[in-house]
Image (tube, rainbow, N blue to C red):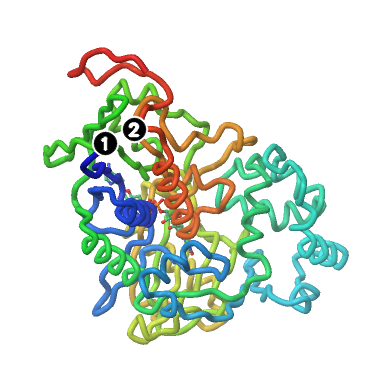
Amino acid sequence: MRDSPDHVVVLGGGICGLAAAHGLARAGNRVTLLEGSDQLGGLGTFFPWRQAWVERFYHCVMPTDDDLLELLGELGLRDEVRWRRTRMGMVVDGRHHPFNTAGDLLRFTPLGPVDRLRFGVVSLLLRRLGKGKDLDTTRTEDWLRGLYGETVWTTLLAPMFGSKFGASFGDVPALYVWQRLGRESNVSTRGYPTGGYKRIIDTLAAALRAAGVDVRTRAPAVGMSTTTTSARITTAGGEVLDADRVVSTLPLPLLRGIADADLADHLPCPSVSYQGVVNAAFFLKRPLSGHYWTPVLRSGTDFDGVVEMSALTGTTPYEGRHLVYAMHYTDRGSPLYLEDDRTLAHRWSEQLVTLYADSGLTADDVEEVRVFKAPFVEPVYPLGFLASQPAVRVPGAPVFLATTAHVYPDVTSWNSSVRLAKRVVALMGEAPTTPPAAKPLHPSEPTRTA
Ligand SMILES: Cc1cc2nc3c(=O)[nH]c(=O)nc-3n(C[C@H](O)[C@H](O)[C@H](O)COP(=O)(O)OP(=O)(O)OC[C@H]3O[C@@H](n4cnc5c(N)ncnc54)[C@H](O)[C@@H]3O)c2cc1C
C-alpha cells in the first residue's frame, strides 16, 4: 500500500482529459494535466469574437448524452443547458427540402414515390432491424444498400454518410451507423449551454484547480519513456515529469510521435485512420432556412453540410448575428485541408451565397468568416473493430489510453469522451500494481522481470 497518492499525468486538455483528471482527483490521486495548446477544450474550443467567445466547431448536446449531463450536474451546470426543438433540411442538386415530417418525405422529389415510402419505413425500423445482428463485421454499404435499395443508397445515403468518412464510408462497420441513429434518430431536441462550451470548460478547469490538479496549458508533451511501474514525460519547455501512471487522450499517431522506441513497441498499432475537418464559421446579417442541420449533396459546393447554429442558440450570443457553420471532413493531407484560409473563406462565402440566393442571401449579408481546421477528428473504423480495438491499458507500461478510437462503437462526442474517461478511471482503480506483461526497462534502470 502506498503512503503517498499516485502521481498521474493526463496528456491532453480536451473534454476527455479534463473529465479523466476530474475522476482521478476525486479518487485521491495527485494529478498533472498537460495541454499542448494555449486553450483547454480540444475540439470544443472557442475563439474570441467581439465581446463573445464562439466555438470553432459547431457543438450541441443531445438529450441522450447521459454521461455528459451527469458531469454537468456535478458542476452545477445541468440546468444551464437550454433545450430547443430543431429542424433539419436537405439540399440535393441545389434544391432545398425540409426533412422533418412524413409530409416532408412525401414531397421529397429527389426520390420517387416508392423510394420515399421505403426510406420512411426502413428508417423507422432501422434500429429494430439491427438488433441482434453482427453489425460490427457488416459493411455499412452492404447493410444499408440491402435495406434501402440501390436508389436511396446512391442518391442520399452514400453521399450523406460518405461526407464524414470519405471514400471508404461503405467499409465502415454498420454498427457505427446503428449507434449513431441510436443517439440522434427521432430526436429533434438539442441543447446548448448558456455561456457556450467555454462555460463548461472554465467551470471544469476551476473545479480541477480547486481539487489540487496542476492544470497546465502551452505544455505539450514531446517525449515519454516508461518502465513497468513509472513514466517519464518531457515537455516542450524541457521540464521532466515523473509519473506513476499516465492517461493519454492524444490521437494514437500523436502519442506514437512522442513515445520513445521502447514504449512505441508496446503501443497498439490499430488499423484506424483519421478524418480531419475543414470548417468555416459565417456571421450573417440574416438567417438561412432555420434548419439546424442541412446535408448538402451534389450542389456545387466544397462543403457538404451546413449547421445554422443560431437556430439552436438564438442570436444573442453573437450580438444579433446569425452564426452558420459549413464543413467538409477530409484527410489532413488533402489539397482542401492544406489550402490557405483566406482563399477558402472567400470561395466558401461565394458558394454559400449562391446556395441560399433563392432565400435572399447576398454577399452583403456575410459580415465575417473564420476558417478552422482540425487534423484528427473522426476515426475511420475498420470492419470488425470490436475485436481489433486497442486495449485501454498498454501492456507492460503504466499507460492508459482514452482516445476517440476507444469510444467505438459509440459516436465521437463529448458524451462518449466523458463516458470513456469514467471507464478508464474506474479501470485504473482496479488495475493491479504489477503490470500484466514484461517489457524492456527504461534505459536508466536495471533489467526487470514481470
Ligand atoms: C466539426 C465538429 C463538430 C462536432 N460536433 C459535436 C457535437 O455537436 N456534439 C458533441 O458532443 N461532439 C461534437 N464533436 C466531437 C467532439 O468535439 C469530440 O468527440 C471531443 O471533443 C473529443 O474530445 P477529446 O478530449 O477526446 O479529444 P480532443 O478534443 O481532440 O482533445 C485532445 C487534446 O490533446 C491536446 N494535445 C495534442 N497533442 C498534445 C501533446 N503532445 N501534449 C499535450 N496535449 C496535446 C490537443 O491540443 C487537444 O486539446 C464535434 C467535433 C467536430 C470537429
- Is residue 50 toward the left or the right of residue 398 in the image? left
Residue at the right extreme, as displayed = 114
- The image position of residue 186, as x and y in percent, is 68, 70
**Residue 231 in view, yes or no:** yes
- Residue drawn at point x = 76 percent, y = 62 percent: 123
Report the residue at 35% width, 35% height from top: 399
Asked if the residues shown at circle 2 and circle 1 are in contact, with their CB atoms under 8 angstroms apart, the answer is yes
Q: Looking at the image, is 194 positioned above or below residue 46?
A: below
Q: Quadrant of the C terminus?
A: top left
* Placement of the N terminus among the 4 image quadrants: top left
Horizontal placement of 83 versus 91: left or right? left
The answer to whether 15 is drawn above or below residue 391 in the figure is: below
Amino acid type of the residue tagged 1 in the rendering: Asp
In the rendered structure, the answer to whether residue 257 lies left or right of residue 159 reads: left
Give the structural element (helix, strand or loop) at label 1: loop
Dot label at residue 373: none
User: Looking at numbered disc 2 in the image, what kind of residue is underneath it?
Assistant: Pro
Q: 30 or 51, which is in the foreground?
A: 30
Depth check, front residue: 72 or 217: 72
- In which image quadrant can residue 197 be found? bottom left
**Callout 1: 10 Å neighbours few (<14), some, many (20+)?**
many
Name the element at disc 2: loop
Residue assigned mark 1: 244
Residue at image mark 2? 398
Q: Which percent across, then down, holds residue 91?
A: 63, 68
The percent position of residue 440, horizontal first and vertical second, equals 31, 16
- Residue at 78% x, 79% y is 103
Left or right? Give the position of 447 relative to 145: left
Closer to the chain start, of discs 2 and 1, is 1
Pick the residue in front: 39 or 209. Answer: 209
Taking the image as drawn, is residue 340 in sight? no
Q: Dividing the image into four equal quarters, which quarter contains ligand 1? A: bottom left
